[in-house]
Image: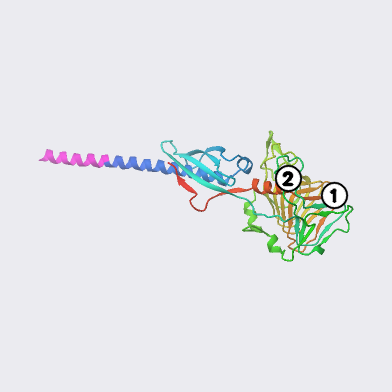
Amino acid sequence: MAVFALLVLGVLVGTSFFVGRQELAVGRSTVRLEEALAAAEGGANLQLALWDPAALNTIAIGDSVPFGGTLPAGGWYRGATRRLSDLLYLVRSEGFSRDSGARRELGMLARLRPVEIRLTAALTARGTTVVGDYARIDGADRAPPGWSDCPASEPAVAGGHVPDASDVSTAGCAGPSCVTGSPAVLADSGLDGTMLSTAGDAAFDDLRSRATVAIPGGTRRIEPSRIGGVCNTLDPDNWGSPLEPGGPCGRRFPIVWSEGDLTITGGQGQGVLVVNGNLSIGGGFAFNGVVLVRGGMTAAGAGGSVHGGVVAASAGGQQNDILGSTVIQYSSCAAARGIRMSALAAPLRSRGWVMLY
């Protein structure tokens, strides 16, 4: 009986040991699976947090861009971001545990969130606008110089869109007609500061969170810059190269937020420029895209241009002075490209995440 009791006790101890080892193995496997899932989720979320418009907003529908990396807490990931439609992307991320013993794969649907701006004129403004010297505001749809891949021109818009036609003064123009369009000046008594300070469902201040470049304002010269022949996207004064669309910075279209009055002394840029204050440009500065100004705009000097459109809310009643040989030219191509190419991506609010393995 003593031997039988020892046998039973040994079986119980052995069973407990076996069950304990099994639970330990299951626990370790669960930890590995959680590490792999965290790596997959981290990899997918990093692609959205560090979205590169120059690389991802330009790929063709059906093409993909691979990615990979490791997480500080352990685990590693790899995957690809595939474009499904004009605005929709699939981020497919495969995560591995620290020891590569477990693998999980997930997919995340993301949608581009372009700034919703509808241009009704080459220059939309609420304050008094003075156009003088050889300056020109043109509502005819024209492609920017050097852009040969724009679609067919759309119907012309107004040259100026203001609350009252008397808000536009052209007494100092040297040319026969310095404001042209269809019509040349569109008078709209309903045009108010609120209308000019929103972009779709986003208020003016909300655009700060969507900016890919944030600067404190001040006086700056904007030029594309390179490091080793590659576009330097870390330079806050590099807003792309619209005058060299085939260059290293030709695909850079940032959303630029200026916190305060901004004076630009020359150079070139493209994308969406948002100025939380007054904007002054000179020195032949060329910009392709959309310019949103909370205050007023002053442009002077020789050779300056904006191809796309300008919206000046004149929140403090500032006057807009378009002087020198400045050109504000409506361009649906430049506006659409600046808005679309500068957009960041965000996951779909519902049904945007699925476990693949």
- Among all residues in the image, which is located at the extreme top? 228
Q: Quadrant location of residue 30? A: top left
Would you say the magenta stretch is mainly helix, strand or loop? Answer: helix
37 left or right, relative to 19: right
Q: Secondary structure at mark 2?
A: strand
Circle 2: residue type: Gly
Give left or right: position of 255 versus 69.
right
Residue drawn at point x = 80 percent, y = 57 percent: 184
What distance separates the C-alpha of mark 2 from that of mark 1?
A: 18 Å
- Mark 1: which amino acid? Ser
Mark number, residue 6: none
In magenta, the rendered stretch is 1-18
Q: Which residue is mark 1?
A: 325
Along the viewing direction, whichever of 15 and 50 lies nearer the viewer: 50
Q: Is residue 12 magenta?
A: yes
Horizontal and vertical percent position of residue 328: 78, 51
Q: Residues within 10 Å of mark 1 (few under 14, many from 20)?
A: some
Q: Residue at horizontal 73%, vertical 45%?
A: 269
Q: Is residue 324 above or below residue 241?
A: below
Q: Position of residue 227 (x, y in %)?
A: 69, 36
Image-based side of 319 in relation to 237, left or right: right
Q: Where residue 317 sits in the image (x, y, percent)?
A: 77, 64
Q: Which residue, given by chain and number where applicable, does mark 2 sit on?
A: 269
Q: Position of residue 9 (x, y in %)?
A: 18, 41
- Is residue 298 within the magenta segment? no
Of callouts 2 and 1, which one flags the residue occurring earlier in the amino acid sequence?
A: 2
Disc 2 crowd rating (10 Å Cα; few below 14, some 14-19, many 20+) is: many
- Which residue lies most toward the bottom here? 189
